[in-house]
Image (cartoon, rainbow, N blue to C red):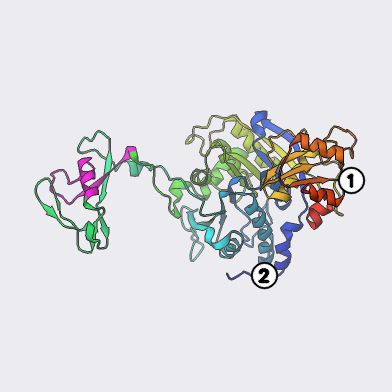
Amino acid sequence: MPLLDWVNRNQAEETATNVPYHLLKFEQSYGDKQQAKENLIIQGDNLQALKALLPLYGGQVKCIFIDPPYNTQSAFEHYDDKLEHAQWLSMMYPRLQLLKELLAEDGSIWITLDDNEVHYLKILCDEVFDRKNFVANIVWQKRTSPDARLHLSTAQDNILVFAKNKNQFSLKKLALTHDQAKNYKNPDNDHRGVWVSTDFTAQGWRPNQMYKITAPQGIEYDPPEGRCWSNIESEFIKLKNDERIWFGQRGDARPRIKNFLSEHDGISAWTWWANSEVGHNQEAKKEVNLIFGADNTFDTPKPERLLERILHLATNSNDIILDSFLGSGTTTAVAHKMGRRYIGIEMGEHANTHVIPRLEKVIEGEQGGISSAVNWQGGGGFSFYTLGTLVFDDNGFLNADVKFKDLASYVWWLETKSALNQAENFDNPFLGIHEGKAYYLLYNGILGDRQPNGGNVLTSSVLNHLNECHSHEGKRIVIGEASRLSPARLEALDIEFKQIPYSLYGNKAK
């Protein structure tokens, strides 16, 4: 597959690997304290924040929406959007790599951009997510009228959609609009309710679908030239006996099939999204103005209806949503109102001046945006975090402030590339089993010794305790400060010992 090349691409390829792991520092919860644990707002560099999230949420995010800087060569108040092209590519590449690792196997990423960089981004995403996982390029009509100052006024933004694994990915259908629903009638008083009829023919010539059909008034019909009936004759008879074939009010028309609204599960979305359906820039600005005032707004927010469409198609209640270019907080506000869990990342001070105040108003029950459409009445909560301590220092040594569960999360991620169950209350060294291997961590006095380095050495007595914690017949991985057991004995017991940090992580620790 052809690859995109640019200045400093080699460094960009290594950036995600070299980003150090940070802990997330809890600052404050808002609203319901229990529900606040499910929703995170993180202030800090999104590259570092995404790396910090991997051990906690790797492989668990159902839908990612990002609205990155468009590189329009113009300055914005809250973002430096005037990046040289190669810098923009180097900024996006490692973030896409980390975002992919956070996605669930049946998850998807939706990225909105204008024409300045979208074609280059498509090539980057083909590489990172694999071209076979490309879903669509959605065209969103973001304006309501042309700009008279321009020879050719831009009407749209693009939304690139990629699946983590297209074989496991699916989208829900959209509900019928009012105009679509009013086409359903019931001229024959069918007990199943209103319906619309559709053509009972198909393109092509199939011998077993070329039979004659006789209407109730005795008129015989053959399929039109170049077409055949939609089903074989036996299936047609079943439909006719079930009163699903319509020959017109007088019973003399060419057959059509009845489709009942009561059996309709919606319509498939297509790639043209009109502003009448999902909102436009003017609507988005009004929504933000109502919250922050006309003098304190973003230049290019997205309307809540646009995010509602995406989250409706790609997620279900309680799924995890992530936005790592959160802006004014539209994604998290919509996710909150729709009953999704969410993670939002913002770098600047407007995480405090825009995102948190907006979500506080959502909790209070604000009625802007999609609130009336989803019957939002308020409630819920979220937690605010900043980037905290480095897990490892510049020399790769473990930070003494790291707690057992924190290190357990990083150990588990680096060993298994899956997130550790954060609901577990670890009271012994056993972490879990992955692909037939049992993992144990000796760290921070987990065996009851309250000394910082106590109980971290693998000895015969500690091994006996590990067997009491969780016996395992297959291979065991023990991670700790040191081992007093000989290599021969470890091999005989099918135990692999890994020392913190070097034998476990190597350069990954940095």
Image point (17%, 52%), residue name? 254
Look at the image and tell me in which quarter the N terminus lies. Answer: bottom right
Look at the image and tell me in which quarter the C terminus lies. Answer: bottom right
Residue 492 within the magenta-colored segment of the rendering = no
Tell me where residue 466 sits by quadrant.
top right
Identify whether 458 is placed above or below 91.
above
Q: Residue 494, which numbered label?
A: none
Depth check: 240 or 449 in front?
A: 449
Residue 237 within the magenta-colored segment of the rendering = yes
In the rendered image, which residue does mark 1 sit on? 484
User: Which residues are the magenta region?
Assistant: 234-262
Query: Percent x, y for residue 72?
Result: 61, 61
Depth check: 259 or 113 in front?
A: 259
Q: Nearer the viewer, mark 2 or mark 1?
A: 1
Amino acid on which disc 2 is placed = Trp
Query: Percent x, y for residue 424?
Result: 70, 35
Q: How many angstroms separate mark 2 from mark 1 (CA)?
A: 51 Å
Q: Give the structural element (helix, strand or loop) at label 2.
A: loop
Q: How many marks?
A: 2
Mark 2 in CB contact with mark 1 (< 8 angstroms): no
Tell me where residue 378 sits by quadrant.
top right
Say whether disc 2 or disc 1 marks the residue closer to the N-terminus: 2
Depth check: 260 or 473 in front?
A: 473
Image point (55%, 59%), residue name? 114
Image point (23%, 64%), residue name? 226
Tell me where residue 212 sits by quadrant.
bottom left
Query: Percent x, y for residue 162?
Result: 54, 56
Q: In the figure, is residue 475 to the left or right of 282?
A: right
Q: Residue 6, which numbered label?
A: 2
Q: In the figure, is residue 285 to the left or right of 171?
A: right
